[in-house]
Structure formats: structure tokens, C-alpha cells
Image: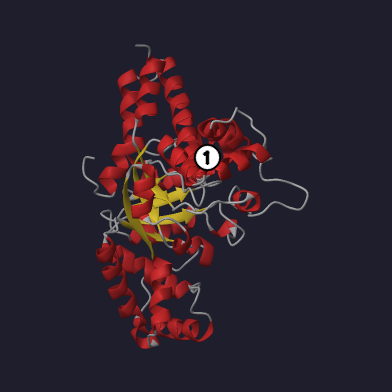
Amino acid sequence: MTTTAAVTDLLDGMPLVDHHCHGVVPAALDRPGLEAMLSEGGPPPAGTTNFDSPVGLAVRRHCAPVLDLPVHASPDDYVARRAELGTEASDRLLRGAGLGTLLVDTGFRGDTLLDPAGMAAHAGAEAHEIVRLESVAEQVAADGVDASEFGSAFAESLTRTVRERGAVGVKSVAAYRTGFDLDPGLPNPIEVEAAAAGWLAESPDRLADPVLERLLLWSAVELGLPIQFHVGFGDTDIRLHRTNPALLTDWLHLVPARVPVMLLHCYPFMREASYLAHVFPQVHVDVGLTITFAGPAGATDILAASLELTPFTKTLFSSDAFGLAELYFLGTLVFRRALGGLLHDRVGSGEWAESDALRVAQLMGVDNARRVYRLGAG
């Protein structure tokens, strides 16, 4: 067997662990609904289409054949065929993604998407939940709590929620709410009470207070599970310059090495994330979401940048697919191709042995996630 065939066969047959993703919409989607989910920017401007984007073209090229359409089928034909198949379209794409395990973030629009059990059934995969910190805090507020008791009530609710749902990790969306330029220390009870009083009196449906974000993060540290951070690329709620993961440096100096910190997506801060993974034992990196939207043409350079300094034991795969099964299918396809190309180049140049490439592929696609999230051997 040639080197190219060995690496390709391993990657193509690998039951990837998608360590950060969301549910898909269970109902049929019309074209506007589909297009709105093909971009982090939402619906396209009038007179344009989100099919005219790297991910839009990739859907027509790679997803169309899964639905029995020719490659490069027109958007109208694609949408019509998707509607004709109904839920079978999503099932074909999810199962075609070749996933072994899904770690599902249920904290955003979870009531409109398939839950982890539903995703497991439709994808033919194992599934576990990731609990979003801000969602737990917002539920505590909605249930009614005095400002003086908010800190303890949140910690108790977080522990209970994780236990009851069997969650394997938690996630912070501080990138969307406050940015990362936070005081790194644990806020004292007086600070927490004052911040909680202000938040509860003003807008308890959306936590965006820097003191309370610090409380959430340190409560997560105490829990000891992997803590995921959305980093960089996202929708218009992001202030990109405040989501550079280098801003977490002082906080990382205080976080015990036993608590995994997972930097998700990372564009355009792949190199900063790679540096942090290199120097901090608890930091791990992926470029999920980013490479899906970049498409096959741009994914290799993005993945390569994230691997410049990152130990191969600390880089993982995720799709961050949301709403559309297409994003699962493309996320896995693009990852397999981009990583395969990089590995082939290293072996072909004589820099790596074939056994090194095969081991690195296995680590990145499956083993690192199973180890960090304590999923067992699989």
C-alpha cells in the first residue's frame, strides 16, 4: 500500500469525534431558512445568495451527490430535492459524515434543534452533552434568586445540571458577551453581589457582565471538566479584537493544569491559539467552523497555521455544525482532506515516517478528544 493510500484510508474510515457541535433543525427548511444557516452573517443581502460563497459552492459540489443530484446542481434543484427527501436528507448527510461521537452544545436555540439523543439516533453515533455556562446562569436568574445568593445558586445549579445531563464538558461564550479582556482573578462575594444586583435589575435574560463572566469561569474551573471557549470567527455579536485568545494569558496562568481549556474555531487567531497550546499544558485547539466556511480551497492553510506550534496531542476536530446537516458533512470532509494533504506532504518530503502520519491522524481525529473528555476507548 502506498503512503497516500494508507493515510487516506485511515482518515476516510475514521469515526471522528466531533468535540463541539449543535443539533440540526428537525423540520423541513425552505430556501430562505436554508440560506440563513449557510452564513454566520445570516440571510444574504437583497439580490444575492449565500450559495455564492465558499461553503455554498461546497454544498452544491459535495452534498448534492448524497441527495442523488449531479455535482454542481443548481441551488433551486438542491433545495427542491432536499424538501422532497424530508428528514431523510439530513439523515443521509449526518450518516455520510462518518462520525463516531458527538459532543453537543445545547445552549443556543436548543429547543428548536435535535437534542443529543436525537442527534445520536439520526447520525448513528454516540452523543454527549456540553453545558453552556451562560445558559445555566440565565436560568438561575429566570427561576428567581436574590443577588446575595446568585454565586452559590449558580455553582449549585451548574453542578446539578452537569450531573443530571451526564455532560462531559462546559462551554463559555464570553467572546460574545464581554470579550476576553477580563480581570483574571475570582471576583469576591461583594463584587458578585453588586454585579448580580445590577444584572438582575436590568436584563437577566442575557448575561454580559464581566464580573459575572469571571464567576462563571471560576465555577467551571472548580468543576474540573473541559472548558470550551468560542474564539474569534462568529456572528455580528462578536467584537473580533476582543476575542484574541492571547487575552486569556493571565487567566491561564491561574488555571490548574488538570483542567482542560479548549479553544474553538480560532480564526484569525490560529497562531495565537497554537502558541498558547504550546506553552500551557491545559490548552487545546481546533479550527472547527472556520474550515467548513472556508471550504476545501482555504482549509489547508488554516489548519496548517494552527499546527505550527501546537503539540499533536492537543489539537482536535470539531465541526461546530449548527442547524444544517450539510455543515456536519462538509466539516468532516474538509477536515479529512486538509489533514490528509498536510500528512501526505510531510511523508512525501521524507520529514515524517508513514507511521508518524498515521498516529497523528488518529490522535487528532479521535484519541485526543476521547482522552480529554474521558470518553473511554470507544
Quadrant in which the N terminus is drawn: top left
Q: Position of residue 214 (x, y in %)?
A: 41, 70
In which quadrant of the rendered view does residue 76 lie? top right
Whether residue 287 is visible here, answered yes or no, is no
Left or right, residue 168 beside residue 134: left
In the displayed image of the protein, which residue is found farthest to the top? 1
Relative to 71, does residue 21 appear above or below in the rendering?
A: below
Examine the rendering and report whether any part of residue 49 can be seen: yes
Q: Establish if 5 lies above or below 262.
A: above
Q: Which residue does the image show at 34% across and 19% down from the upper left?
A: 354
On the image, the x and y values in percent for residue 209 come to 49, 74
Q: Secondary structure at mark 1?
A: helix
Image position of 356 with respect to 46: above or below: above
Q: Which residue is mark 1?
A: 291
Rendered residue at 31%/63% (across/down): 221
What amino acid does circle 1 point to?
Ile
Position of residue 112 measured from the top left corner of the image (x, y, whole percent): 48, 61
